Image: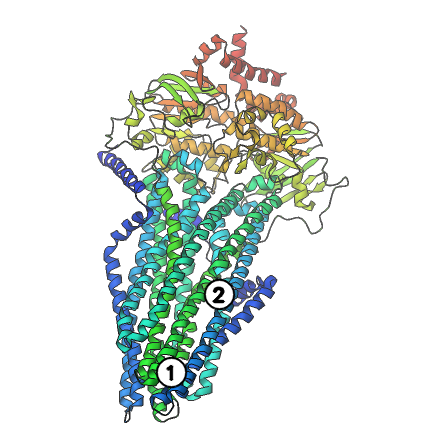
Amino acid sequence: MSLEELKASRAGVKDYRLSDRIRYSTGRAWLLSYLKKYWGRLTLGTLFVFISVSFGVFIPRQVGSAIDDLKASGVSDESIFRHAAAIIGVSLASGIFLFLQRRTLINMSRYIEYDLRQDFYAHLQRLPLEFYQNYRTGDLMARTTNDLSAVRQIVGPAIMYSEQTLFRVLLVLPLMFQISWKLTLILLLTMPLVSVTVKYFGQQIHVRFEKIQEFFSDISARAQENLTGVRVVRAYAQEQAEIAKFDELNQQYVERNLDLVRLSALFRPLMMFLIGLGFAVILFYGGRQTARGEISLGDFAAFNLYLEQLIWPLIAMGYVTNLVQRGTASLKRMHEIMAIEPAIKDAPGLEPVPEIEGRIEFRHLTFRYKPDGPPVLSDINLVIEPGQTVAFIGRTGSGKSTLMNLVPRLLEAEAGMVLIDDRPIGQIPLKQLRESIGYVPQETFLFSETLAENIAFGVRTATPADIEWAAEIAGLAGDVKDFPQGYQTMVGERGITLSGGQKQRTALARAVIRQPKILILDDALSAVDTETEERILAHLRGIMRDRTSLIVSHRISTVKEADLICVLDNGRIVERGTHEELMALGGEYADLYERQLLEEELAAS
Amino acid sequence: MAEAAASIHEEEQLGKLYDVATARRLLRYLYPYRRLVMGALALTVVINLVRQLGPLLTMWAIDDYIKPAALGRLDLEVAFQGIALLSAAYLLSLAVTLGIGYFQDVLLNTIGQRVMYDLRDQIFRKLQSIELAYYDRNPVGRLMTRLTSDVDALNELFTSGIIEVLGDIVLVAGAMGMMFYYSWELSLVSLTVIPLLIAATAWFRRGARAGFRLIRTKLARLNAFTQEHLSGAQTVQLFNREEKALAQFAEINAEYRQANIDTIFYYAVFYPLVNLISAIGIALLVWYGGGLVIQQALTIGALVAFLQYTQRLWQPIQDISDRYNVLQAAVVASERIFKLLDTPDRIVSPARPQLPARGARAQGQIEFRHVWFAYKDQDWVLKDVSFVVEPGQSVALVGHTGSGKSTITNLLMRFYDLQRGEILLDGLDIRLWELRKLRENFAVVLQDVFLFSGDIASNIRLGNQAISDERIEWAAREVRASSFIERLPEGYATRVRERGAGFSVGQKQLISFARALAFDPRILVLDEATSSIDTETEQLIQQAIGRVMAGRTSIIIAHRLSTIQRVDQIIVLHKGEVRELGTHQQLLRQRGIYYKLYQLQYKEQARELSEMLGD
């Protein structure tokens, strides 16, 4: 491990502290930090909005003057033409800045969306096993898709439209006051009505929308599970039952949505009504003023046009409120995840340790999944020297996998209970720890990439020769020869085109290619036939001579060559020794062995 | 590497789109709700006609009351009364619009929600019937996009799309009617900018359409990547892959961002352009209409009304971009949905399903006759495989991994259809069976046990309500799953999380055995299932399997001789061919492949046994 890499791993520590800060702040502050990053664009965009609106508000004035000119006697065609040309010129200038504002502000929102997604994903990647046992993938997916896009609406369209509204109102109002302050004041009486409506509906809609979003997560999760488990569904002819279950959720989803609609449907017509009220006021009061000659007919027309110019901003306010309400609900859901601090992480200021030798010690190790739960492992004491192979055998649920998970810190034991090279593993940088471990889990997970990419998954660079070497060790090379595309064969979403055994051997090759100091096989060859398994184990013995191997298995044939065999029962090591010693002990292991022998005997008979 | 990854995630480019066909098909989804649609339509027409009143009332107010009064030709009191009356009429029209608008919105959304329900239902059903090979080709993330985002994109179409476009048409037609009524000359002049608008819209259409397509493709890729890397988060962490995965993610994420930014350009140009064209229209009105007023060919009130009408006229046309946005998203989404829905179900029940003489519940006789099968092209996984299993008999499939054992069970249940030869159940080709009846005869324990979120009982029963709680408990007892289940605080009601997280592989297998037993199948299929269970648990299950097998035809894939020794027949597969066939003893005597397999499994133990016995 180079110094640069170690520095990089320390950089990770800093990130954790960032998430610490996030935890105590609100989601809004979190989002604001992204806006700050783009303050230059935001400022420029705001300026563009201002300029665009400034030009736009001249149009009603021009139209009004033209109408007044018409009344005046001896008006020339030329002066009317000048008014017409001015309208076009002002609109062109306004349009150019309208173009620029969208390019600046909406593009910015896409950059922020990118950053948010990047950080959200990076954060998810840091969260431990326990987190993924509590949150369904479908739920997390909903947060990275629907919620993220709702959040983007806040920093994009919502900002742009708010600014348009703000400037429009600020610039139009003085012009209206200039014509008739009385009429403007009366018009302003209807404005608060609009605000009140927007606020009330916004809140109500927000609450219901949030519930619907939650429900949507459930639906996605349910559907996704069905799709992932398609083979079971088909095998048990459960399609109809699955459809019925989905139908129920689908139905409920529609009902909840309609519940929202019954409220939100009032929103737009009510806005239209309130805006129309403004025109009625102009017609009634402005009409009287014009009839009395207090304002000119051109002013009267311009007033109408000014109000027209305010309509869209007022509607946009309602729209923006919705965007913000929805975005806030989504922001909360995203932030909820961001605020979860990775339970397993490096302590601040952790220094890299010398290269790991592979001495593993479990010291009075007791482990519980929940503080008040029953212990899954009790008082495990074991020292494994570098170069040793230790096998663990025991019945289902005896704690073997849990023990294996503790070494690469997929699960976290109490400080000082697990040591590597006499150092509590908490004092070894997580990255360095895991880099020295090759782990082959019980259940294989392959990625939708080529076989070569899956094998080279955990190494920085790998030559084709490296990949072939690893495949050879893992007993996969022969199979690959039969694939028309060799190592470039694509592996299906969950490695579906490979058999269980092939998947396991691919996972083994993935671990082997790292040339790890510590190799952990958690019942990793269960789907591999015995002949292949034997060959693989022989290969492994060759390359693991000065490295540490931990092997969990149910097969005596797999474990009997190990330097030490531990029999686990109910979270305790009940027997330990070599194959011969354990046989001589005549305990659980010998029992197991005898049962397997008995099988053979029966088979031979 | 990125390219290779791209090829699997990238959605196939869709061919040339025929809008009319897609649109017509979308409209068909409205048919079941035609009454609601008619209602919404009627309300739309009424509301848009009422909306025409505003400018008209303004015109009357100006020409008949305001202007004459201002010029001193009309008594001020008379003018005020007139203005008051017209204002009241306007207020009334507003109130009517409010009431109708509400019901219109509720109706439209109801229609939209119902159609979305139908679409989700259809897509989900399709995914239940489409052949498994489709799942091999399409990541779950992509299928989820169909079911969620794509359907949502259609919602807008049905709520604010189609019917509001019709509303806009009424609005435009009404306004134009009014305009032509008062001055056909001025109307024609103000309409001269329409070709400009159409040109701008056409340009926008092309750009935005291409953009949307790209956005969707990139989004699907992004989702597929995220989905996979969240499911495999532990693997990513164990192999220190975080940085690399993040870099890959950044690349896909940036592609998505770029696709969006490229599309924003078209919007950024289109809106100002339309505004400019609209301003030209107003300028023309002022210039030409002003001339008409001077010539006294037009009243000032009519000119003001004209200005308002053109505003109303332009609004819907400007909205075309918004509507187009919605439509565009909807068309792209619906193309994808329809493509899925149109994928033919290759594995379906025959038009006239047959039943063997003794009815749907099979006796359990299975026969493979010269079966050839390849997942792809000519890569034969099975070559000329033939064998017979009599009712109640058990057969073990033995061979190296990849020898084609799993494929045999996949074919038997018609997860895939074979290319040559035939498979018979009770003497009847499985392709002549009704698919559901065929599969109901089987219970399967697969290599990867899949548990659904719910509780333990629901995982044993699945969706079959005919399976009682007593039966579930009985089945669990039979396979000895009851001992660990009953130790759990909530027993059979214990919550099972997504993919059964929290249960060990052995526990999951026990549950899956209980599931198989509860369904009381005629034929039991075990696929390498016993291989990850410790010896003790396995022995418990071996006993149970004996009970499950009794009276049932069983096909078992196992590497373990303990399972195999009890079967009636062993089929040894090698590279897709049946190489040996017979009982355990017969095969041992043959000293062939089976003998070798047997030797490898037990020779060590046999040697030690003889040492122990002092031979």
Q: Which three-letter amino acid code belongs to the residue tagged 1?
A: Val
Name the quadrant of the N terminus of chain A.
Answer: top left
Q: State whether residue A84 appears in this view.
A: no
Q: Nearer the viewer, residue B410 or A148?
A: A148
What SS does tag 1 mark? helix
Disc 2 or 1, which lies upstream in sequence?
A: 2
Q: Nearer the viewer, residue A138 or A275?
A: A275
Residue drawn at x 48%, y 79% as measured from the top left:
B174
**Among all residues in the image, which is located at the extreme right?**
B357
Residue at the disc numbered 2:
B161
Q: Is residue A291 left or right of residue B139?
A: left
Name the quadrant of the C terminus of chain A.
Answer: top right
Q: Nearer the viewer, residue A460 or B194?
A: B194
Q: Is residue B527 left or right of residue B204?
A: right
Chain letter of disc 1 in the image: B
What's the distance in space between the residues labelled 2 and 1, CA to CA? 31 Å
Q: Are marks 2 and 1 on the same chain?
A: yes
Q: Is residue A582 left or right of residue B289?
A: right
Q: Quadrant of residue A80?
A: bottom left
What SS does tag 2 mark? helix
User: Given this view, does label 2 or label 1 mark the residue nearer the observer?
Assistant: 1
Q: Which three-letter amino acid code belongs to the residue tagged 2?
A: Gly
From this view, report whether residue B550 is shown above or below residue A255. Answer: above
In percent of width and height, residue B499 lies at: 50, 37
Residue at the disc numbered 1:
B304
Chain letter of disc 2 in the image: B
Q: Residues within 10 Å of mark 1 (few under 14, many from 20)?
A: many
